[in-house]
Amino acid sequence: MNPTVGTRLLLVDDDRLVLTTLARELTGLGYVVEPAASAEEALRRCETGSFDLALVDIRLPGVSGLDFAKVLTDRCNLPYLFLSALSDPETVREARGRGAQGYLVKPLTGAQIVPAIETGLARAREERTLRDREKHLSVALSANRETSIAVGIVMAR
């Protein structure tokens, strides 16, 4: 699976070695990567830039990556994948329940992440399309209700 060149990724990990290594590898594969060593730094980047996907470590200083991912969704409308050294079923289940596009267990390389990134991007696009369709259907149904009410009033008169 080839990377979508120019895709903007927000990479959040407090481990500087992981952050630097993955950022370099993903950049070399054609992604535009903004590294952030903390949730605060990531949020600043997110609020001032536009990203297609975030890669978030589960364990961040001061805040759980699980909780921070919800902030990314709520404030930046940003889909995310989790990166973690933890692979216990409970953590994975909780990550899935929080709406993660994927869950990757470290250590890993940029090439290992590409399929998950591309799948996460595709899934996020599909979810966005479904939300847009739902919004349009809701508006259409509302308009139909108003039309039905108007027809009913005219018929009653």
Image (cartoon, rainbow, N blue to C red):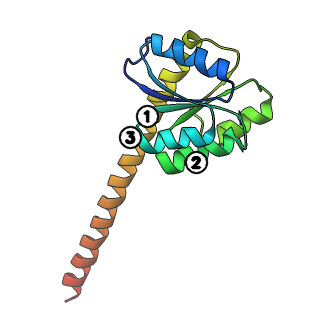
On the image, the x and y values in percent for residue 152 come to 25, 79
Please give the label number shown on residue 85. Answer: none
Judge left or right: residue 22 versus residue 1: right
Cα distance in 3D space between marks 2 and 1: 14 Å
Q: Nearer the viewer, mark 3 or mark 1?
A: 1
Q: Which residue is mark 1?
A: 51
Element carrying mark 2: helix
Judge left or right: residue 74 versus residue 125: right
Amino acid type assigned to the residue bearing label 1 in the image: Phe
On the image, the x and y values in percent for residue 84 come to 71, 26
- The tally of labels here is 3
Judge left or right: residue 110 versus residue 134: right
Amino acid type assigned to the residue bearing label 3 in the image: Thr
Q: Which residue is mark 3?
A: 129
The one nearer the camera, 50 or 114, is 50
On the image, the x and y values in percent for residue 12 come to 60, 31
Mark 3 or mark 2, earlier in chain: 2
Mark 2 or mark 1, earlier in chain: 1
Residue at x 73% of width, y 36% of height: 93
| CB atoms of marks 2 and 1 within 8 Å | no
Q: Using the rendered view, name the quadrant where residue 36 is placed.
A: top right
Q: Nearer the viewer, mark 3 or mark 2?
A: 2
Mark 3 or mark 1, earlier in chain: 1
The answer to whether 156 is drawn above or below residue 31 in the figure is below
Q: Which residue is mark 2?
A: 71
The one nearer the camera, 146 or 43, is 43
The crowd level at tag 1 (other Cα within 10 Å; few <14, some 14-19, many 20+) is: many
The one nearer the camera, 85 or 115, is 85
- Would you say residue 136 is visible in this rendering? yes
Q: Using the rendered view, name the quadrant where residue 41 is placed.
A: top right
Amino acid type assigned to the residue bearing label 2 in the image: Val
